[in-house]
Image (cartoon, grey):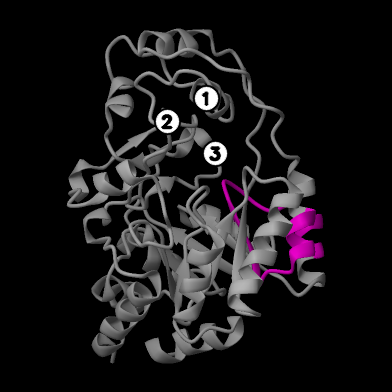
Amino acid sequence: MSVRERTGSFCDRYGLTVPVLEAPMAGACPPGLAAAVAAAGGMGAAAVVNDSPAAIADWARRYREAAGDAPFQLNVWIPDPPADPGTEAQASFLDRLGGTAGPAPGPAPDFDEQVGAVIDARPTAISTIMGLLPADHVAAAHAAGIAWFATATTLDEALAAERAGADVVVAQGMEAGGHRGSTRPEDAERTAVGLFALVPWLAGALSVPVVAAGAVADGRSVAAALTLGASAVQVGTALLRTPEAAIDAGWAAELDRLAPEDTVTTRAYTGRLARAVPTRYVRAWDGPEAPDPAPYPHQRRLVAQYRAGEPGMLDRVNHWAGQAAARATTRPAAEVVAGMWREAEAMLP
């Protein structure tokens, strides 16, 4: 199958005119950004890891008000195994960074209830990160006509997702901003595979389509990913400076001219490995006196508690950044997506 046939088949299957998906980014995927991506012919998205069922329903309603019946995905996190919740050393370190804890955050949303709300919202796809969607949820999604897009960072993870019923595998390279989607938290540093090694490795072994994610920010990277076997691409950091994303101004400014080698991986925000801007707070956790961050979700909840009090050196928001951050622009999101595809299409055979 040619590149154009492969991408055309994917677009036909999922109601797209452009093989570009918005990456689901928690806290940075308002309905207006997703609608702008859809207006350019791509697929909008939201990450709902922190959302209640009511918030999930509200996001889907607002998206449809803006985008009609355009396709979109809703992304859930597969819960981590239980871990020691002790955070005394980490709290003491945040105190030394000038912070004061506020009230503890309330309980996290129930995963099964989140999945039920996603299925009730009837997106084009439910997407997952950090593991496999349980079989009963896969069956419920498919019964509702909802596809499952599973994130994988290795071939073993991708094959496991295919066996479990995934309709699409999102190949996430180590260049990607935000969280590394490794199934086992302890594997994240060890299995750091670049996108252009990962895509052909997965595409040659799977029977389901592969979507390429990680440092895809212009037409050249889109064309390269599709040529290597992807059926579509997923774009995150490249959209963060658009007006529709409306992220924190300080975070947006730090993405401007941020070199690939200047992004770092850290567990300082959530306890899960993620790629970010090397802010003072992030760098502090690499210091000789810093403890290891607590496991997810305990580090995330501790960070939320200090943000609710006096944060001190703690960043007010997580400053995620992929290695293509410097190519993010302040143009409207629909222009970014349309221009990306226009440039890529001119390069494809």
Q: Nearer the viewer, mark 3 or mark 2?
A: 2
How far separated are the C-alphas under marks 3 and 1?
17 Å
Q: Mark 2 highlights which residue?
A: 267
Q: Mark 1 highlights which residue?
A: 299
Q: In what element is the residue under mark 3?
A: loop
Q: Is residue 2 visible?
A: no
Q: Amino acid at mark 3?
A: Arg
Q: Amino acid at mark 1?
A: Gln
Question: Given contact means CB atoms under 8 Å apart, are the residues at marks 2 and 1 in contact?
Answer: yes
Q: Residue at x 52, y 53 (%)?
A: 156
The question of residue 127 being in magenta is answered with: yes
Q: Residue at x 27, y 54 (%)?
A: 325
The question of residue 125 being in magenta is answered with: yes
Number of marks drawn: 3
Q: Mark 3 highlights which residue?
A: 184
- Disc 1 crowd, CA 10 A, few/some/many (<14, 14-19, 20+): many
Earlier-in-chain disc, 3 versus 1:
3
Q: Position of residue 165 (x, y in %)?
A: 69, 65
Q: Position of residue 44 (x, y in %)?
A: 53, 69
Q: Nearer the viewer, mark 3 or mark 1?
A: 1
